[in-house]
Amino acid sequence: MKPQPLILRADSRRLRREFVMLPYRLYRGDPCWVPPLVGEEKKFLQPRHNPFLRGNEVELFLCRRGNETVGRIAAVLNRDHQRHHNDRCGFFGMFECVNDPLVAERLLGAAGDWLRERGVDTLRGPASFSLNSVAGLLIDGFDLPPAVMMAYNPPYYRQLFAGLGLREVMKFFAYEVSRDTIRFPRAAERLEGRLRDEGIRFRSFDLQHAERDMATLIDLFNRAWADNWGFVPTTLEEGLDDLKKMRPVIRPDLILLAEKNGSAVGFSLSLPDINQALRPLNGRLFPLNWLRLLRNLRRIDRIRVTLMGVLQEYRHLGIDLVFYKMTSANAKRYGIHKAEMSWILESNEAMNRVLRHINARITKTYAIFEKGLGNG
């Protein structure tokens, strides 16, 4: 007879290491899982390295059965979300679990109890630690590795969630195009010239003034995305932290700004898919994997269009279509011939329509789940 699964808080250095290392054991042998760098995963849990943790609360839980760790979860009190939406929603993230409904029940129960004690009435996730980071449960498209900063999980997680009463509240998609499949409507050839006549110019990210341009991107993101489902503003501190992490792989002409008379009205941010370089390293850089990483970085052939936004009054002018066309042309110079556009909310019909127009196809579907916590 199996021992009963027990929950404990990962509140020591040893237990936090167990928390970090669990996925490396659970996914061993999975050809699509991309092991993140262990050192970066450890930093993600430290407030001095992760600005999110300086203004929000997170509690980490492990589930043990006998001497074996069989699951983990993070309970997330996202005060930024609560302030912006004026609700009592809490989140869970970093969920990993063996295929056992009882283990999943104990994990989600522990996260729910911790959040309920702090006045939360709704549990939502997965999000690690917010929708501005790695978020969503993969529910379709398990045959391809995830792009950079996109989630991956076994198919059975969806059944575990459903069995515990969590319901899907939003889906979002990852689209893909390649050099051979992308098609632009004829109007796109004339569009940039027409926008230029209206005073709209396009330029690349300026690495010489990287902090200034990142501040502009953050401002545009917070204004352009304000009406999107689940939106939470990001801070300049978080943006500059992301810039520091991204800087080694940034290609300036894959980050574009649209300006009207010198004032920014839209942006597009694409990154080389560093997951292609990380995948063979098994989460380690030393002793010699850093040499493999340098070699692998030169072989990346895919980008992820990570973010795009246009201010409300400048939408429907085709700025987004020009962003895609310019990004496609610029990417070719780096030997990149594939792109993932993710994530795109199911409810964002305008962006879904643009992607269909350029012959992009959905390769992965993700979902956010939710459950009322009641009174215990």
Image (cartoon, grey):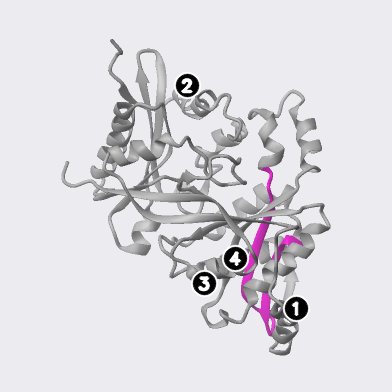
- In primary-sequence order, the first of circles 1 and 3 is 1
Which residue is labeled 1 in the image?
189
Asked whether the residues under the numbered discs 3 and 4 touch, taking CB atoms below 8 Å apart as contact, a structural biologist would say no
Kindly identify the amino acid type of the residue bearing the numbered disc 3: Ala
- For the magenta stretch, what is the residue range? 253-274
Residue 137 part of the magenta segment: no
Residue 211, above or below 143 = below
Dot 1, crowdedness within 10 Å: few (<14), some or many (≥20)? Answer: few
Which residue is labeled 3 in the image?
350
Residue 271 part of the magenta segment: yes
Numbered label attached to residue 355: 4
Which residue is labeled 2 in the image?
14
Q: Is residue 25 left or right of residue 109?
A: right
**Residue 251 location (% of width, % of height):** 76, 56
- In primary-sequence order, the first of circles 3 and 2 is 2
- In primary-sequence order, the first of circles 1 and 2 is 2
